[in-house]
């Protein structure tokens, strides 16, 4: 649960409110695309019906205890390895092992870096530049992230 206050209203959020029965129709989505979160809005303190709010809270607690949780969808971006990098990974087992230990984000950074080059010579020079970085387990832009 969460509690929030704004200029025109205040409310209680139920993070997995989609599982609540909501027989009194008190819950609403924050936005159309909201999946699990539901909110109970109030415009003034007199709008709060303590017994109803407690019913919803107790139901939310029971749902949580029973494991009713809507996990967020992970939109896994696949890593498409350019052919130049694929060939290098095949020919150098230590590079392949190091590449596999990188996070998907770092793998995508390296793949995009190679793939975005237009000329073959540029692709090869970029590949030579990143090989030691991959073996060290660094991301392409890690040196800028510690500033």
Image (spheres, rainbow, N blue to C red):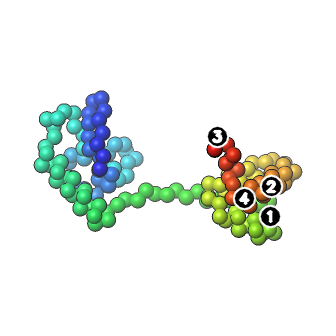
Q: Earlier in the sequence, mark 2 or mark 1?
A: 1
Mark 2 or mark 3: whose residue is earlier in sequence: 2
Quadrant for the C terminus, please: top right
Distance in Å between CA atoms under marks 3 and 4: 19 Å
Q: What is the spatial separation of the Cα atoms under label 4 and label 2, in whole angstroms?
A: 15 Å
Q: Is 143 left or right of 3, judged from the image as shown? A: right
Residue linked to disc 2: 127
Placement of 80 over or under 13, stated as above or below = below
Q: Nearer the N terminus, badge 4 or badge 1?
A: 1
Residue 147, numbered label:
3
Q: Nearer the viewer, mark 1 or mark 3?
A: 3
Q: Residues within 10 Å of mark 1 (few under 14, many from 20)?
A: some
In the rendering, at what x and y percent does residue 123 appear? 82, 52
Residue sitting at x 29%, y 35%: 5
Query: Which comes before the other along the chain, label 4 or label 2?
Result: 2
Tell which tag, 4 or 2, sits nearer the viewer: 4
Q: Which mark is residue 88?
A: 1
């Amino acid at each position: 649960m969460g509690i929030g206050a704004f200029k025109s209203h205040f409310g209680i959020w139920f993070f997995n409110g989609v599982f609540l029965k909501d027989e009194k129709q008190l819950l609403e989505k924050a936005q159309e695309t909201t999946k699990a979160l539901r909110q109970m809005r109030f415009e003034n303190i007199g709008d709060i019906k303590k017994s109803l709010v407690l019913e919803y809270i107790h139901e939310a607690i029971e749902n949580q205890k029973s494991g009713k949780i809507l996990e967020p969808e992970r939109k896994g971006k696949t890593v498409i390895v350019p052919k130049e990098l694929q060939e290098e990974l095949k020919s150098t087992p230590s590079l392949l092992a190091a590449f596999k230990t990188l996070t998907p984000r770092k793998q995508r950074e390296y793949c995009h870096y190679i793939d975005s080059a237009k000329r073959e010579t540029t692709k090869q020079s970029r590949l030579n530049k990143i090989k030691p970085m991959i073996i060290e387990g660094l991301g392409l832009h890690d040196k800028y992230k510690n500033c």
